[in-house]
Image (cartoon, rainbow, N blue to C red):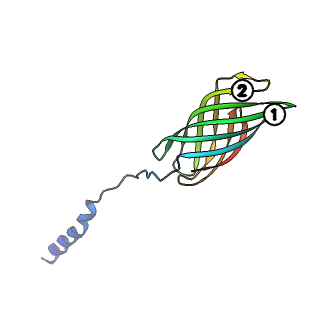
Amino acid sequence: MKNKATLLLSLLLISPLNFSQEREQEIIVKDYYPNAVYGSLGIGGLYFTATGFYERTLSYNGRLRTFAKVGVGGYALWGIGGVYGMGHLGLLTGANNNHLELSAGYNRFFTGDLQGDYPLSGTMGYRFQKPDGLFIFRTGVSFPEAVYLGLGFSF
């Protein structure tokens, strides 16, 4: 009788463990700032660029952010130079601080030797930005920015 009581008590104590469930890891969407302003300096062999951007987030799900951005910049090449503008649609991947940044869009040179339409413009780079942070650091390759480094803030 003592063995049966011990067995019954053991089953009662262990049975709640059998009914536990594993939870899938949830994606927590943190607060984020939908607007950003940043600038970048670039070098592309013999020419140099400086560009300023305004960016607006279109959608955000914790791991993927889509955005639209507009920028105006200038370039210099051995005594000549000019001004350009661009508009891009892009996406930012990653849920933490480190992101892959991809964008593409329209580009136009307003002044200088390259004046006119160069319709294809694109960016592929790395961005450090905390999901709820203000500081932005960017680096990568782009046309017309070339190989760039950039700093900015979100609000």
> Mark 1 highlights which residue?
76
Badge 1 crowding class, 10 Å Cα cut-off, few under 14, some 14 to 19, many 20 or more, is some
Depth check, front residue: 83 or 42: 83
Depth check, front residue: 112 or 11: 112
Residue in the image at 15% along x and 78% along y: 2
What secondary structure is marked by label 2?
A: strand
Say whether residue 46 is left or right of residue 139: right
Residue in the image at 60% along x and 29% along y: 105
Residue 66 appears at what percent x and percent y?
A: 51, 39
| Relative vertical location of residue 60 with respect to residue 133 in this rendering, above or below | above
Residue in the image at 81% along x and 30% along y: 81
Label 2 and label 1: CA atoms lie apart by: 13 Å
Residue 128 appears at what percent x and percent y?
A: 62, 49
Say whether residue 3 is left or right of residue 100: left
Residue 3's disc number: none
| Relative vertical location of residue 3 with respect to residue 104 in this rendering, above or below | below
What secondary structure is marked by label 1?
A: strand
Residue in the image at 59% along x and 34% along y: 103
Q: Earlier in the sequence, mark 2 or mark 1?
A: 1
Q: Amino acid at mark 1?
A: Ala
Badge 2 crowding class, 10 Å Cα cut-off, few under 14, some 14 to 19, many 20 or more, is many
Residue 72 appears at what percent x and percent y?
A: 68, 35
> Mark 2 highlights which residue?
109
Q: Amino acid at mark 2?
A: Phe
- The residue most toward the top is 116
